[in-house]
Amino acid sequence: MVLLKPTTLSKSSKVGPQQQQGFSESLIGDSVEAADAFICQWVTPHLCDSSSSSCSLSSLFSAQNRLEGRRFLEVLGKLQYAIQSTVAMNPDSAKLAKGQDLMRKAMKHLEKEFYRVLKSNRRFLSPESVSGWSSESNIPSRSSGTASDSSSDGELYSESSSELGKDIGGGGNSDAIVDLKMIANCMISSGYEKDCVKIYKKFRKKIIVDTLSHLGFEKLTSTQMQKLEWEILEKKIKIWVIVARVAITTLFNGERILSDHIFSSSVAESCFVDITLQSALNLFIFSLTVAKSRKTAEKIFPTLDVYQTILQLTPKIDQIFSYDSTAAVRLQANESLEKLSESVNAMMTEFQSSITKESSKSAISGGGVHQLTRYVMNFIVFLADYSDSLATILKESSLPLPEDYFSSSGEENPGSGDRSPMAARLAWLILVLLCKIDAKSRLYNDSALSYLFLANNLHYVVTKVRTSNLRLVLGDDWVANHEVKVNQYLEKYEKMAWGDVIASLPGDSTAGTEAEESLRRFNEAFEEAYKKHKTWVVPDPNLRDEIQASIARKLMPGYTGFYKKHPVGSCNIVRFTPEDLNNYITDLYVGLGRSVPVSKTKKYMVSPSHTTDLK
């Protein structure tokens, strides 16, 4: 039977009040009779209620009964139309009350069916699964008041399920979304929106709360969190970073998609807000509390972790919480970024101050790399790993860096760094460190050792920049400029430390008494330099090899030529073969004061007074 709404009747027809009452009476009577016969097949007292932990096996929306479920909704659509028509045309009808009572029973049963579909498909409807769906899956809606035969109903159901299956990755469980949507449409259009969404909100909100708890997120007030020791709060930050990413990209995103799939826009918004709003706000209470922590340099990296997480999630937050009713979440996320940014700036200032205030007065043994250099550079290298976040935090710079600090030419080029406020700030921290190291070089009484100390520390700085993200921030020109300075320090060190030795080197044309005197001066100068420098250190093996090679290039050719004319034993003062000399040079800068045995020299020594190795 096809029911025609009043608007489909001929406009020329004039229906009197008695005819209208008769029509509505017939309509409500037929609808109640048909609905009563069909509904009573399913609405029976033994079925579980919506809060029960088990559901009836004879469900309307089980796989074998799903078409019956569609017919059930169709019958209710007709009954609802009949009730509405009767209320409008014959509100005193005796059959109206029976129809309304029958509708209440049917709606109560639909509540149970709605809950059962939610519960039995919980795995398929988990946030992890739902968040992978298209946010705008095309689920054809159907009017709950339109009648059709069972054949067309089956075709429509099959088509709806098929189209939805494509959007959410296929699978028979896409039937669940169609079931939930049709049940929700029926209940809401019948005036039972409150009952429908109450079940949905309660069920889905528990999933959110339980999942957050399982991930390790604790609901703490700002006051409770501020009382935590930093070590405990730092552990909670690590957990929060993981929880926040899962919550935004999976939990809240999944709930937004699922609500949009099942309900119309206004109802979907209401459900989504009630399910997620408080949990989302609790999430960002944590980040605001982190921003209020005491501003010390060691806290900057956990603070940056929180900032970076929110910054990366901001586009998703804006998309998921786009409703006016969820503006509080967007505002709280933005406020978190602002407060965390202020905290990071304060911590950067504190870090710079700690460099300036470092007051150790003891010189590093052997001119090695100062612990301040290691600490500061490791700190700055880690900062560079947050360059994307720091670029949004460090927006202004009035630091007095030289115009050409980032490039040798003073002009921008691909290797000259980005010259951003962030780059300037990191470069300034390094400059503050180098000024501090320069001051500490004056703690040495030996000028040569001062320059070796400067070369070691600057080389360490340059190596750290070249082998980390700092190279991308500061640029290749910065690296090249400071490598030149390392070489300048080394040249000054070499001139002061080995100048006398090189100057005393006898030429291969030197002969006779002059040769012996020249060699004596060389032996004394070399022995003095060796004894002094054997405890000095060059920690970096590459730099050590470079210095040793430079010294060898200046000593070995001249000494080898002289040795060929005056080998060991040809005069009393020839102590070393070229191989012995090279071994002593190779022994330098390891900081252990080792000596290389001069076995060949010992064999040919004439004077016992000259058989002692260099110690």
Image (tube, helix red, strand yellow):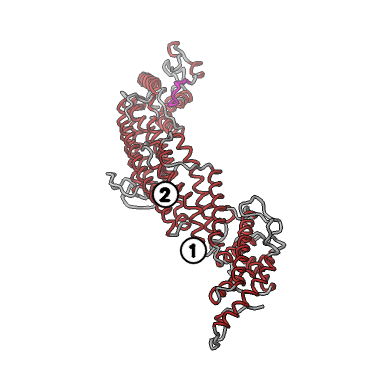
Give neighbour class at mark 1: few <14, some 14-19, many 20+ (Cα, 10 Å). Answer: few
The local secondary structure at tag 2 comes to: helix
Q: Which residue is the site of mark 2?
A: 388
Reading the image, the residue beneath label 1 is: 266
Question: Which amino acid, mark 1?
Answer: Ser
Residue at x-position 42% and y-position 59%: 324
Position of the C terminus by quadrant: top left
SS of the residue under disc 1? helix
In space, the residues marked 2 and 1 are separated at their CA atoms by 38 Å
How many numbered marks does the figure carry? 2
Say left or right for 445 vs 231.
Answer: left
Q: Which residues are magenta?
A: 588-595
Q: Quadrant of residue 107?
A: bottom right
Q: Quadrant of residue 427?
A: top left
- Residue type at mark 2 is Asp
Residue closest to the far top = 608
For image coordinates 53% across by 47% down, the residue present is 209
Dominant SS of magenta comes to loop
Q: Nearer the viewer, residue 539 or 260?
A: 260
